Image (cartoon, coloured by chain):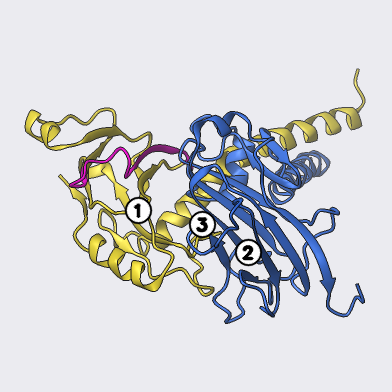
Chain colours: A blue, B yellow
Amino acid sequence: MLKRILFVLSILLIGAVLGVGSALLMIRNGAMIGRVDNNHWYTSRTVGSVDADPYTRALVARIGLLGLNRQETIYYSRTEDEAGVAFDGACTYRIDGGPLAARWWSITLYAPDNFLAVNGDNQPSIDATSVEPNADGSWSARIAPERGDAQHWISSKNGGAFALSIRLYNPEPAISDHLEDVPLPVITREACEGAGQ
Amino acid sequence: MKKPWTIWVGLTLLVAAVLHVGFMFGYPYIVMNAAMDRLSANGERQNVWTHAPRMTETARLIVRPSPDLAYSSCVYDLSDGPVQISVQPWGDYMSLSLFGANTDNYFTLNDRRMPQSGAVVIVRTADQSLTETQQAAAFEVVESPSQRGIALVRRLAPSAERFAEAEAARERETCGSL
């Protein structure tokens, strides 16, 4: 009798650990069916929409709750620079962009807890109303713990292994079918505090 | 006859698969319910707008908030009947979006589609009916996939001045039972 109870209990316990554990791992590691990659940025075709699959919904619940569908807003995220190295709040990055095909856009830095970095700088983002582009539409900004001489700046102080989000509000209809080709800003690491680079 | 250990492995994997799928389906509801509880002060402020202050580094209500937007939320509960939402016009991007209990964004109305004077939207469940007068007063009648959900207004307000203007506009908005 005891042997049978142990048999059933072990099945339930180990099955629960495996089942829930693997689900949590997938949510935590961003497994996202419908994910679209675009030069280190990534997005989902189904965020917010009623077509989202359970995995996408679970991921959205963790990192993008109350996100709008892609006809209204397209969200891209990234966690690494052009070399594929994870962002580091202590480093200095240059971000180069051009016109973005949306009515309004913003780029915001989030700490690993998915909230704004706590640093007192009040510079968590740049947006279409704050960036002054050149005559050809190009613009650049700095992501760094200190502003220095940058005209446009996002503070990464206390950002740790931060992530960036681009929001494209009222995107031009054509781009929602070409999410992998939309021209997006390029982010290059210029220096790293204490790393001698 | 199968050996006990093969039965054990098979049953364990079956339990794991069922719980994996169940957790994946249930997780968005759990998170959304927690968000609805937070935004409504544990149900104390349902069917009423709550206007968030400017999003700063101390905001912890919703993940990845945009510091450039003014947010207003209304956790709606249709158990006592349909809910009527009114929104004011805004000279920049704004949207009213509705989210079901499973996180789906099932309805969005932005300023481009909204009448210049603002809009009234009625949210109801599939089995709730409206009078002709109620229907006529609404810009749109929307069917909610769940009894509870969240209405969210976003207004582009990237400066302190614009945020103050957004605060004035949203004070005139309503969210409540019909």
Residue A9 picture location, percent across and down: 75, 44
- For mark 2, what is the residue? A110
Residue A124 picture location, percent across and down: 58, 69
Say what secondary structure mark 3 lies in.
loop
Say what secondary structure mark 2 lies in.
strand
Chain under numbered label 2: A
Magenta: main secondary structure equals loop
Which label number is shown at residue B92? Answer: 1
Residue A171 picture location, percent across and down: 50, 40
Chain under numbered label 3: A
Residue A142, compared with residue A25, is above or below; it is below
Residue B22 in view, yes or no: no
Which label number is shown at residue A128? Answer: 3
Marks counted in the figure total 3
Report the magenta residues as a range.
Answer: B102-119
Which label number is shown at residue A121? Answer: none
Question: Residue sitting at 92 percent across and 26 percent down?
Answer: B3
Identify the image quadrant of the C terminus of chain B: top left
The picture quadrant where one finds residue A174 is top right
Residue B70, compared with residue A12, is above or below; it is below
The picture quadrant where one finds residue A187 is bottom right
Question: Residue sitting at 68 percent across and 77 percent down?
Answer: A157
